[in-house]
Image (cartoon, rainbow, N blue to C red):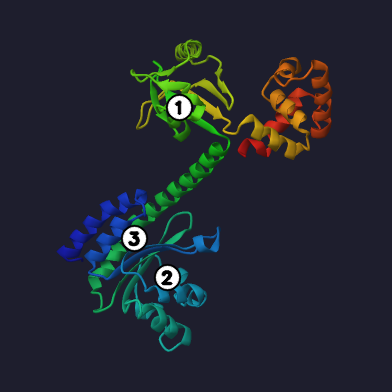
Amino acid sequence: MMGEGLGAAHASLIVPLIAGMTEEPPWRGFLDALRLAVAGDYASLVFRPLPLGTPEARVIHLYSGQPSPPPVTRHYRENLYLRDPMPYHDMIEGRAYRLGELLQFGQPAHDAYLSQLLVPSGMNHLRMIRFAESGGLSGWITVTRREGEFPEEVDTLLESLAPYMRPALGSFVALERERMTAAVAREAVRRLNFGWLTLDAEGRVLDADHLGGEMLRDGAQVGGGRIARGKDGRLTARDPALRRQLLAAIRELAENPQARPRALVLTREPWLDLLLVPSGQRMGTTQAAPAIVCYLHADNWSSADRCEQLAQLFDLAPSEARLALALSRGMSISEAAPELGLTVESARTYSKRIYAKTGARGQADLVRFIHRSVLVIA
């Protein structure tokens, strides 16, 4: 049985163990508390090796205390790492090991590991325990001292933590997977120049991502400040006609969750539009459930930039690229021709060249080709 001191230490470690899953870096408070509880100089939590990913990202190393000196760390990474003799995956899960049970003294590789890494790092005395989550990923807790062997109570403390480490590691793995998925999705949305706002049934702004927040700030450059958060918290527009359209769309969608989404063009140069969609969320979790989601699409490139990119991508002449951009934005040939200083007949001739060069069979094809090209993330 543990003494009262380590029994209290066990209890005091559970809260930082759970809280550590969302810390940055993870489990820093837990490792600090563990190092103090065992009177160690150093405590670490390592996951090794992860099955996929870049080599430098396959080992996750978290620690508290004084790390190895930089020359020793460099020597380990460049030389000893490939000949690391520690039997990490052969360790029985949930059992604490002493240094003498992990290294076979007298064997060259084991002696080199001890003399070139552990001793220069002040890790003369060591305890290590392995634990694993249900998906198969293992983690190792290590505590070390420069002076004085650890008492047996430390082994008992570490072994008592193993049942808690398993679900904690499983939750951490799931959180990391969700974080990675969210990060990739955020980057894709950012490259597509999409942002979002959420509104309640009265049109009050509940939340926004980075782009949506930029547009709501006073003096925002995105969209020329065409939309804003009013003093009452409701989404509004500075232009009276646009404000009426926006309010009518919000009212319709709030009253009828089955209503079709409503799209509004905020600016044409650079292009910025807004799609209002009834929210499928009717019950909140930790936040109020929105009634409406507003998706914002901003083309931060000017028309001149886009024309240059279209010309490069499809080998178009400048005049052809300008017409292709206009057609991709939904304008008809008769609408685009006067804006570009062309006769309708000339615009039709250009459109035939555009379709031939892009392989499009008509305007619908052209719109699809352009909006599915790399230009959407340029």
Q: CA distance from mark 1 to mark 2?
A: 51 Å
Q: Quadrant of residue 316?
A: top right
Label 2: which secondary element: loop
Using residue 373 as the reference point, say whether residue 33 is left or right of it.
left
Residue at the image position 67 percent from the left and 39 percent from the top: 374
- Given residues 166 and 184, the one toward you in this image is 184
Label 3 or label 1, whichever lies nearer to me, is 1
Mark 3 packing: few (<14 Cα in 10 Å), some, or many (20+)? Answer: many
For marks 1 and 2, the one nearer the N-term is 2
Q: Which amino acid does the dot numbered 3 rest on?
A: Ala
Residue that protrudes farthest toward the left in the picture: 4
- Which mark, residue 91? 2
Where is residue 187 shown, x and y percent of the image?
A: 53, 42
Please identify, in this view, whether the residue under mark 1 or under mark 2 is nearer the observer.
1
Is 120 situated above or below 31? below
- Find the residue positioned furthest to the front: 341
Q: Position of residue 78 (x, y in %)?
A: 51, 74
Q: Secondary structure at mark 1?
A: strand
Front residue of this view, candidates 371 and 304: 304
Q: Is 75 displayed left or right of 122 in the figure?
A: right
Which residue is painted at 47% across and 87% down in the image? 108
Q: Is residue 184 above or below residue 65?
A: above
Q: CA distance from mark 3 to mark 1?
A: 44 Å
**Could you tell me which secondary element the residue under label 3 belongs to?**
helix
Q: CA distance from mark 2 to mark 3?
A: 13 Å
Which label's residue is closer to the chain start, 2 or 3?
A: 2
In which quadrant is the C terminus drawn? Answer: top right
Task: Tell me if I can see residue 301 in this picture.
Answer: yes
| Label of residue 162 in the image | 3
Residue type indicated by callout 2:
Met
Which image quadrant: the N terminus? Answer: bottom left
Q: Residue at x 38, y 18 (%)?
A: 234
